[in-house]
């Protein structure tokens, strides 16, 4: 008799109802975190790959699972201002005002790091990023652990962030010890990563555009400025803010209008390529509909509003990658405050 030992690389996935998260599942997930394990969980932005923030070995596992350089800092997820204060060396009025206005929610604040928080979480730096997520499963998990959870987006380095549990499994499922448990809470509400604001200086500096726009931030704190790393590609040297990021496998091309997008798709499809076409026009143009029929052009028409578009954008990129397209052509989005974060991600996916 032969005996074989199969080690499944597929992580456990447990469905959790975000309206009423099952306490038994959360207790088990918290136990895994306490033991140094990794739990992927939904937030309102994207899925996170969670580890206990104060556990240096668990943090090392997160970096290894993602294949992420050690100097790229992680975000610590907390229950609110009280939890943030526990891991911050100091907590300014500015931090308080912004946290009061936007937490729980998709805003991350960079503050001075408390001495007991391992430097490894913060990529070796003396600051720490904190955020109180709004998603009920994320909140329940933080409460069950009773401690901060460090969580980058639950994807391999430079890949598109996950907005459903299946994206997490696709990206990290085959990585040895990549993730011990995935909590499946359905699709993320916002679909794009949190706004990151450094509140350590005399002015608040946006390091990453996100669901909370510049106008909303300035209404609370008029000092808010856009960081050089966001404004220009040359200056983008701050940790974790590479120009290339959030990129699908296929080459991504931004076209000025839907007509130009359609024209490029036609051209590429004619030369035998499989093409993805991401539009947000009111209706899919007739020619595009025709193109889609021949199977070489895959069309996704996303909502016209920025929030709806953001919710579906990464999933569209994931789907097109899964279909094995050679190129993804995206109709450019408006360049106003509402579309700020989407335009930023679009730019980073093309470089
Ligand atoms: O919405 C989100 O923020 C998601 C969910 C899971 O919360 N998380 C996320 O994490 O996007 P990650 O690791 O993929 O991106 C963290 C971002 C990076 O742009 C990083 O540079 C910045 O936050 N960041 C983290 N800590 C920082 C620090 N101490 N100083 C400056 N930037 C920091
Ligand atoms: Mg990320």
Image: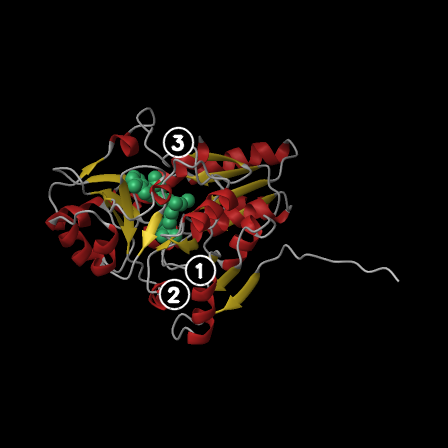
Q: Nearer the viewer, residue 166 or 237?
A: 237
Q: Residue at x 14, y 46 (%)?
A: 218
Query: Badge 2 is on which residue?
Result: 141
Numbered circle sitting on residue 243: 3
Helix, strand or loop at disc 2? Answer: helix
| Residue at 47%, 60% in the rendered image | 35
Tell me the tag on residue 195.
none
Rounded to the nearest angstrom, the CA distance separating label 1 from label 2 is 10 Å
Q: Tell me residue 305's x, y (percent).
A: 33, 52
| Tag nearer the camera, 2 or 3 | 2
First in sequence, mark 2 or 3: give its number. 2
Check contact, mark 1 vs mark 2: CB within 8 A.
yes
Colour approach in the figure: secondary structure
Which quadrant of the rendered structure holds the C terminus?
Answer: top left
Mark 3 is surrounded, within 10 Å at the Cα level, by few (under 14), some (14 to 19) or many (20 or more) other residues, namely: many
The answer to whether residue 161 is left or right of residue 78 is right
Residue 285 in sight: no
Q: Which residue is mark 1?
A: 33
User: In x, y percent, where is residue 44?
Assistant: 36, 59
Quote the CA–CA distance across marks 3 and 1.
Answer: 32 Å
Q: Is residue 100 left or right of residue 278?
A: left
Position of residue 172 relative to residue 73, above or below, is below
Q: Earlier in the sequence, mark 3 or mark 1?
A: 1
Q: Is residue 3 visible?
A: yes
As drawn, 125 above or below 12: above
Q: Secondary structure at mark 1?
A: helix
Mark 3 or mark 1, whichever is nearer to me = 1
Residue at horizontal 51%, vertical 34%?
A: 263
């Amino acid at each position: 008799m032969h005996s074989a030992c199969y080690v499944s690389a597929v992580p456990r996935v447990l469905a959790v109802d975000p309206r009423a998260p099952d306490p038994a599942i959360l207790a088990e997930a918290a136990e895994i975190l306490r033991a140094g394990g990794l739990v992927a969980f939904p937030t309102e932005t994207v899925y996170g790959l969670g580890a206990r923030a104060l556990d240096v070995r668990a943090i090392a596992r997160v970096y290894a699972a993602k294949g992420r350089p050690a100097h790229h800092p992680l975000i610590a997820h907390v229950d609110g201002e009280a939890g943030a204060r526990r891991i911050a060396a100091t907590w300014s009025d500015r931090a308080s005002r912004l946290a009061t206005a936007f937490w729980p929610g998709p805003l991350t604040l960079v503050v001075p790091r408390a001495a007991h928080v391992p430097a490894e979480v913060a990529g070796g730096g003396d600051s720490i990023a904190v955020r109180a997520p709004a998603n009920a499963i994320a909140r329940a998990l933080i409460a069950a652990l009773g401690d901060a959870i460090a969580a980058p987006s639950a994807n391999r380095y430079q890949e598109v962030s996950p907005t459903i549990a299946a994206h997490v499994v696709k990206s990290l499922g085959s990585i040895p010890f990549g993730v011990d448990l995935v909590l499946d809470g359905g699709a993320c509400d916002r679909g794009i990563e949190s706004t990151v604001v450094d509140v350590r200086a005399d002015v608040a500096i946006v390091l990453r555009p996100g669901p909370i726009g510049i106008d909303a931030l300035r209404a609370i704190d008029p000092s808010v400025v856009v960081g050089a790393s966001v404004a220009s590609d040359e200056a983008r040297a701050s940790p974790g803010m590479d120009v290339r990021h959030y990129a699908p496998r296929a080459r991504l091309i931004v076209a000025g209008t839907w007509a130009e997008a359609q024209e490029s798709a036609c051209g590429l499809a004619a030369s035998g390529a499989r093409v993805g076409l991401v539009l947000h026009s009111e209706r899919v143009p007739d020619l595009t509909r025709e193109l889609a029929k021949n199977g070489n052009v895959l069309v996704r028409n996303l909502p016209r509003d920025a929030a709806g578009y953001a919710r579906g954008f990464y999933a569209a990129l994931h789907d097109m990658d899964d279909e094995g397209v050679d190129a993804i052509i995206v109709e450019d989005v408006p360049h106003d405050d509402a579309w700020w974060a989407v335009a930023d991600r679009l730019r980073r996916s093309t470089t």
